[in-house]
Every structure is written in C-alpha cells, then in structure tokens.
C-alpha cells in the first residue's frame, strides 16, 4: 500500500472586496508622492542653501531661526554686542543687565547702593537696612522714641499699647471711666451701656420699654412701641390691623386697606 500526498496546494482566491480594498493603493501612493514632493524639496533647499550662517532650522517648522547671540535682519543673522555686566536672556536674542546693574541705552550702569542699604531684588533698586529709612538717595537712622517700637517694615516706628503718637513722641492714653482700649491699643472707646461725650463716657439712660441697640451706645424701643424724643410711646393699632415687621408701626390685615383717618376698611374690589 503506497501513501501519496493527496493534499492540493491552497491557492488564495482574490475576492472582489479584497481588490476593492487594496486595488487603489498604487494610485494613492503616486498621488501622495506628487503632493509631498514640493515639501521634501523645500526642506532640502533649506538644508542645502537657504538657511543663512549662524542659523538653524526651526524644529517646529516654518523656516529657520537665528542661533543664540544673533538677531534676524532680513534674510541674515547678525551678531549683537552684549555689554559688560550683562548676559543673554532666556531666548538668546537680547540681553539683560546682571544683578546690581540697570540698563541705560546700550550699556549696564552700576546701581549705587548707599551705606546701610542693600539691593532690593534682581530687577534693580535698593532698600534701607532694618532701623533705617530712605531720605532721597541715602538711608538715615530711624529714631524710636520711648514707649515705641519698629513697625513691620522696620523703617518706621509705632507706639506701644496704651500710648498714642503725638509729634515725634508717644504719650500715655487716659482711659475714662466706662471706657476701654480700642483694638489698635492706641485709642479708647466707650464700653457697652455708655456713649462718648467729649473726653468722657456717659451712661446711656434707658426709658421704659427700651433696650440697648446692637452697638450698645444707644437705645431702641421694644416691639409695639415707637421712639419719641427720649421716651417710647405705645403704637396705637386700629381694628383689623396688626404691628408691622419694624415693630414700631402697624399694617392693615389682609383684605383691608389703610384709610386717611388711620383706620382699616375692608377692600371691596
């Protein structure tokens, strides 16, 4: 019994769908090659001759850029002079003065820092040391009087609590009876239940049906009463009315309308 390989070679059958899918590729490649050829030629021309000396191709496209230390002038890159005490900026196409110098025309001039001062920042300028204040182009010592201290800026002074500034000195504060130091500590105010009259604190006199207001230096009438001079008068509420939201006046009940004679009449409309 002989054995023979009866399997036939498999021949791929090209379907209409396959031809439709890949048949247009050669034509498409030709079209793309024609479209892209000018761009390829443009890049080649940049590399071969259109990029000027001291320049490089822009990695993001769009031609070329000058190297650091050069500026674009027309179709060329021209070197520019960096003066003494200066350096190229972050882009490399201009310069900045070093710390302690400021730009004037095409040079960097030194910042003259007076005694008892220091450079303020990289932008230039100077500030006086702690305990000194600026006077024109110099720093003068801050005179701190008795019962005073240097403020947060360290270039001026403030009086301590219970003292107030008078001229160039700090004078003690006399707090009257019924008063207390204010938040600053350099003045006083009346306590709750007192009101300021000149340089003293006088008690607030409460009439009947009154109470201290929110600030505590005056009074208001209770609900159902209204203020009249130095007393609280009862609000006279007519028939078919009630005390309003303010508490010191009245309003007609729903369905009633206020009349000129201060009565409430039923609304007939």
Image (cartoon, rainbow, N blue to C red):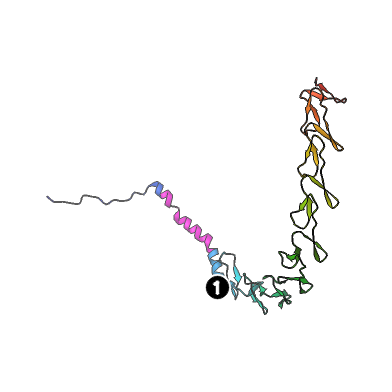
Question: Toward the viewer: 195 or 40?
Answer: 195
Residue 15 shown left or right of residue 256 in the figure: left
Measured along the vertical axis of the image, is residue 144 above or below residue 215?
Answer: below
Q: Quadrant of residue 116?
A: bottom right
Q: Which residues are magenta?
A: 19-37
Measured along the vertical axis of the image, is residue 151 above or below residue 180?
Answer: below
What's the residue at 80%, 46% (across, down)?
Answer: 194
Question: Toward the viewer: 250 or 76?
Answer: 250
As helix, strand or loop, the secondary structure at mark 1 comes to helix
Please give the residue where the numbered disc 1 appears in the rendered image: 48
What's the residue at 27%, 52% (across, down)?
Answer: 9
Q: In the rendering, at what x and y percent does residue 126 appear?
A: 72, 72
Q: Residues within 10 Å of mark 1 (few under 14, many from 20)?
A: few
Q: Quadrant of residue 193?
A: top right
Residue 107 shown left or right of residue 236 in the figure: left
Residue 151 shown left or right of residue 34 in the figure: right
Residue situated furthest front in the rendering: 177
Q: In the rendering, at what x and y percent does residue 166 appear?
A: 82, 63
Q: Quadrant of the C terminus?
A: top right
Question: Toward the viewer: 139 or 164?
Answer: 164
Residue 80 shown left or right of residue 148 in the figure: left
Residue situated furthest left in the rendering: 1
Q: Quadrant of residue 38?
A: bottom right
Q: In the rendering, at what x and y percent does residue 237 appear?
A: 81, 26
Residue 111 lies in the magenta stretch: no
């Amino acid at each position: 019994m002989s054995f023979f390989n009866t399997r036939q070679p498999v021949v791929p059958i090209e379907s209409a769908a396959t031809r439709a899918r890949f048949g247009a590729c050669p034509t498409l490649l030709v079209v793309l090659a024609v479209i892209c050829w000018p761009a390829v030629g443009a890049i080649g021309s940049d590399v071969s001759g259109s990029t000027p000396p001291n320049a490089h191709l822009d990695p993001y496209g769009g031609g070329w850029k000058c190297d650091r230390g050069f500026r674009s002038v027309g179709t060329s890159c021209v070197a520019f002079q960096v003066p003494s005490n200066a350096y190229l900026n972050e882009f490399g196409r201009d310069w900045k003065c070093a710390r302690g110098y400021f730009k004037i025309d095409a040079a960097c001039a030194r910042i003259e820092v007076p005694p008892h001062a220091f450079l303020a920042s990289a932008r230039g300028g100077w500030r006086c040391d702690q305990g000194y204040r600026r006077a024109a182009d110099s720093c003068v010592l801050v005179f701190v009087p008795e019962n005073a201290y240097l403020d947060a800026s360290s270039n001026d002074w403030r009086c301590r609590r219970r003292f107030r500034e008078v001229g160039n000195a700090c004078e003690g504060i006399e707090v009257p009876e019924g008063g207390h130091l204010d938040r600053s500590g350099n003045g006083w105010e009346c306590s709750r239940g007192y009101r300021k009259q000149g340089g003293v604190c006088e008690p607030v006199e409460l009439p009947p049906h009154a109470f201290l207001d929110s600030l505590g230096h005056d009074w208001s009438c209770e609900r159902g009463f209204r203020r009249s001079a130095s007393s609280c008068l009862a609000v006279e509420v007519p028939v078919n009315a009630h005390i309003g939201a303010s508490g010191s006046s009245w309003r007609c009940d729903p369905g009633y309308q206020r009349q000129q004679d201060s009565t409430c009449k039923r609304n007939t409309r």
